[in-house]
Image (tube, helix red, strand yellow):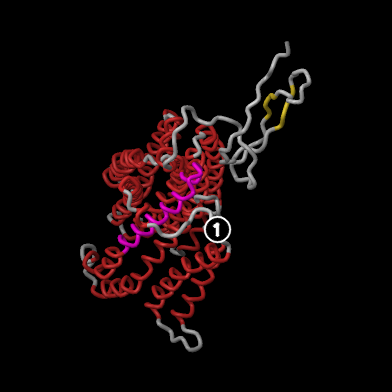
């Protein structure tokens, strides 16, 4: 969670700097991220050696405590490699470079499957390690990801050359840059923690409903995590494009990105929720074969799918707010929706009114509705020009007196948010009498801010 909060900051700050064409600053933000996550990884790794102390608060089973402690100790080496990989991945994605992370992501799945089999069950000269084979395999996979990304994306492809000039500690340690990165990262981390912890608390409430309800809620919570991955993957390009446009001082283009991506995202979330409901039987069967647990999940699935739909809309729209660096706004929205609405409502309906598992997830629906509504209100009232000026200042560029509202120039890569071509009037410059003509403009979606002529209708004398 800590790493994910800092990764969002990398995507936002690097994306804004890239849109502002301050390419050196893109590399500086990455350097700051690497320094911060390296320092923060140390106490996190140390905490993995004291997991049993925390677990004693929820269980007194000595065997469970011993196994959890052993598992966490072998898992500690994964923290720093995962943090570095996350920062490098967001650094590339903020520049709309998606190929290396995608290639490494697919390759890491294969590495994970192979290492899990080898270390758990043994193969050839490798003995079967059983239980501790799983965390060892995860450690190997975690180290593979950043190493493979550096070799493929940086050394082989050279995607870093445009924005990376080597480590410059003096440039990183400028107070204003440190303050900007730290404040944004802390805010994003707090928001992620608040958004995730509330569901952990609700899961704890499900434990008071009995073992069957707890098992059913665990399956639903696992499905929730899977759908979150889909929505986050869809929101990422939205965050990148919005940050690029804001850094380029193009608020109209950023606003258009919001409209297009929200429409496509809304369709995606609806289809995802619908397919989850339609194929609920095989999905549930993948997690459990217990008929009682299956019946509970089946009866709760319509409410769950409604909550999934609302959550997807909220996650996708929040990507634009993240691109604006409005961490405090996100924290306020999450606090109001998750902790002031969702948790009390879930407790009231699920436990006080004895609605059981249905009540817990109706509380989730109420909380996600509040978050979605507040997100819509925030984006509706936002001053896009001011957000663009802030992004330009944050990218250490001079703020123009007015934002760039010209049509977009051609882009070599057509992205998900490229819109249809536009037409504008222009005046011939060959000395012929002026007349009304049309010129076809290029695809929407470029972050190019180089000067281009703006033509208007001219009336001949």
**Which of the pair 331/213 is nearer the observer?**
331
Q: Which residues are magenta?
A: 17-41
Residue 82 shows in the view: yes
Q: Is residue 166 left or right of residue 66?
A: right
Q: Secondary structure at mark 1?
A: loop
Locate the N terminus by quadrant: bottom left
Instruction: Look at the picture and state if 360 lies above or below 419.
Output: below
Residue at 42% over, 55% down: 30
**Which of the pair 212/275 is nearer the observer?**
275
- Residue 5 appears at what percent x and percent y? 37, 52
- Residue 29 appears at what percent x and percent y? 41, 52
Instruction: Look at the picture and state if 305 lies above or below 432.
Output: below
Location of residue 418 (image quadrant) = top right
Is residue 70 inside the magenta stretch?
no
Q: Residue furthest right?
A: 432
Q: Is residue 456 left or right of residue 151?
A: right
């Amino acid at each position: 969670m800590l790493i994910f909060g800092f990764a969002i900051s990398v995507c936002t700050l690097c994306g804004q700097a890239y849109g502002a064409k301050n390419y050196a600053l893109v590399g500086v933000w990455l350097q700051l991220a690497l320094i911060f996550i390296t320092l923060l990884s140390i106490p996190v790794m140390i905490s993995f050696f004291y997991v049993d102390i925390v677990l004693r608060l929820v269980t007194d089973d000595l065997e469970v405590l011993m196994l959890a402690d052993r598992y966490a100790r072998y898992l500690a080496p994964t923290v720093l490699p995962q943090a570095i990989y996350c920062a490098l991945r967001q650094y590339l994605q903020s520049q709309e470079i998606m190929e290396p992370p995608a290639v490494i992501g697919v390759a890491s799945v294969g590495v994970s499957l192979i290492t899990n089999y080898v270390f758990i069950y043994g193969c050839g000269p490798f003995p079967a390690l059983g239980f501790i084979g799983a965390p060892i395999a995860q450690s190997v996979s975690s180290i593979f990801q950043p190493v493979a990304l550096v070799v493929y994306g940086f050394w082989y492809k050279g995607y870093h050359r445009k924005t990376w000039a080597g480590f410059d500690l003096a440039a990183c340690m400028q107070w204003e840059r440190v303050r900007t990165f730290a404040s944004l990262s802390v805010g994003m981390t707090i928001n992620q923690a608040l958004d995730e912890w509330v569901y952990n608390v609700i899961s704890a409430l499900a434990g008071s409903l009995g073992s069957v309800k707890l098992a059913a809620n665990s399956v639903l919570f696992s499905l929730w995590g899977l759908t979150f991955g889909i929505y986050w993957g869809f929101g990422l390009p939205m965050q990148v494009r919005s940050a690029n446009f804001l850094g380029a001082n193009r608020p109209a283009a950023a606003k258009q990105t919001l409209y297009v991506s929200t429409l496509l995202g809304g369709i995606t979330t609806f289809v995802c929720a619908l397919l989850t409901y339609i194929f609920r039987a095989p999905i549930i069967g993948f997690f459990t074969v217990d008929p009682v647990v299956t019946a509970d999940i089946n009866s709760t699935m319509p409410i769950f799918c409604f909550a999934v739909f609302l959550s997807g809309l909220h996650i996708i729209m929040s990507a634009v707010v993240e691109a604006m660096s409005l961490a405090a706004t996100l924290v306020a929205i999450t606090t109001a929706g998750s902790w002031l609405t969702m948790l009390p409502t879930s407790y009231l309906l699920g436990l006080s009114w004895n609605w059981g598992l249905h009540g817990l997830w109706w509380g989730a629906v109420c909380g996600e509705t509040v978050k979605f509504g507040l997100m819509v209100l925030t984006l509706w009232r936002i001053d896009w020009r001011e957000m663009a000026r802030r992004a330009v200042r944050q990218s250490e560029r001079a703020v123009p007196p007015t934002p760039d509202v010209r049509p977009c120039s051609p882009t070599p890569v057509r992205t998900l948010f490229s819109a249809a071509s536009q037409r504008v009037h222009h005046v011939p410059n060959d000395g012929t009498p002026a007349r009304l003509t049309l010129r076809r403009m290029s695809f929407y979606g470029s972050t190019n801010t180089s000067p281009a002529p703006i033509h208007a209708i001219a009336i001949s004398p």
